Image (cartoon, rainbow, N blue to C red):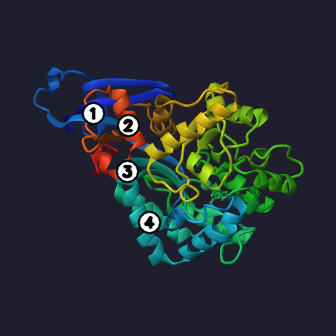
Amino acid sequence: MNKELWALKGNLVWAEKAGEMSMLPGGYILMEGEEIKGVCDKLPEDYADARVEDYGDSIITPSFSDMHLHAPQYPMMGMAMDLQLLEWLQNYAFPMEANYAREDFARLTYKKLAKELISRGTTRVCIFSSLHRKATNILMDELEAAGITGYAGKVNMDRNGGVNLQETTEESARETRLWLEENKDRKLVKPMLTPRFIPSCTDELMEELGKIAKENPDLPTQSHLSENLEEIEWVKQLHPDCTHYYQAYEKYGLWKDGTVMAHCVYCDEKERKAMKDAGVWAIHCPDSNTNIASGIAPIRIMLQEGIKVAMGSDVAGGAKLSMPEAATDAVRVSRLRWLFSGKKEDFLTVADVLYLITGAGQEYFGAKPGFGAGDKLHAVVLDDSDLAYNPFITLDRRLERIFYQFSPACVKAVYSVGVKRI
Ligand code: GUN
Ligand code: FE
């Protein structure tokens, strides 16, 4: 059966690379069913009778990817921001996550989280669950029901979890294998291996996870890397044979193409080279890095070195779910690095961060950055008509203003996998 030809019309803005903003005012995204056929400034003849979803003067960009967040921490967003990582985990995050042994609580929380994500234009995620297998399945169900795609992970942690948030090594490996089996046929939200971080996983568990990764070559891994100085010191004590944090993942075969590492605040030249050589992605989470005083990641340097970078909200180290807010936070903290480097280290621009919250995630998930022909449509329609009337500004400045003043009210429509969800 022929699929319907249809089109979206609006001011198209996208970024195929960091720093390269492309614009097509009054442009069309040509569609066939769920799939993009191309973009153009005039409807071609075969689209003469096509249905056009006309968004007038609104801006259409690819939808957003949140490449690192903790679903179970959603109810504690904005709490305990006076602590640093290790105390914050022990006193707040871990006790919160222990509650997800309760499936009714997980259902309630994850339904609301999924709704909030999609209503803010996020259609792709790499998301941590808790160590609970059943609650993780509930998270995957609720994300899919809302139209969110990507990867979710049942967390592995067999040490240092405190009361009620720890598995035995055997249990962690067994539950992970069972969970992978239960979710092998999922289409929208797929499983991802998720050792919490090195202090949470014994060598024996890491070995098991390495085996699981080897048995499942398409199963990617997500974790945390070089976020906080005390954490890094702790990892050194746990793995005295490793000069660098990343080697504790590398030892077990988890440092490889498509591995996603959140934060990377303190990655030195050697660790960054190892990222580039292996094809490991750095996920920049500036709100979290500021809130729990972790530091400022050298993102401009990483981009210059050709490291793959994307962005995450890191809720609930981060206290904001909207990726445009993460984007402007990335600009803000990079401005501070610029200033404190004696204006030597370049800062990030809106064109850089537009790529980091759209094109980078598209690339990670195998799509072309922008509106690539052959890809399923993932797009967000952004409206600035409720902001102060200002008819004097260009399209790129309009996008900047929406990002800096972002609220869900700016989101007029969201498309995920070719389907309108909002
Ligand atoms: N490192 C290990 N677990 C966590 C977490 O939940 N949040 C953050 N920000 N860092 C972590
Ligand atoms: Fe995190």
- Residue 28 is left or right of residue 124, and the answer is left
Q: Residues within 10 Å of mark 3 (few under 14, many from 20)?
A: many
What distance separates the C-alpha of mark 3 from that of mark 2?
A: 16 Å
Rendering quarter of residue 26: top left
Q: Residues within 10 Å of mark 1 (few under 14, many from 20)?
A: few
Q: Position of residue 214 (x, y in %)?
A: 68, 49
Quickly name the residue at label 1: 390
Quickly name the residue at label 3: 120
Quickly name the residue at label 2: 401
Residue beneath the point at 67% across and 65% down: 89
What distance separates the C-alpha of mark 2 from that of mark 1?
A: 11 Å
Eye-nearest disc, 3 or 2: 2
Quarter of the rendered structure image containing ligand 1: bottom right
Eye-nearest disc, 2 or 4: 2
What distance separates the C-alpha of mark 4 from that of mark 1?
A: 38 Å
Check mark 1 vs ligand 2: CB closer than 8 Å? yes or no.
Answer: no
Please name the amino acid that badge 4 sits on: Tyr
The reply to whether the C-beta atoms of the residues labelled 3 and 1 are less than 8 Å apart is no
Quickly name the residue at label 4: 110
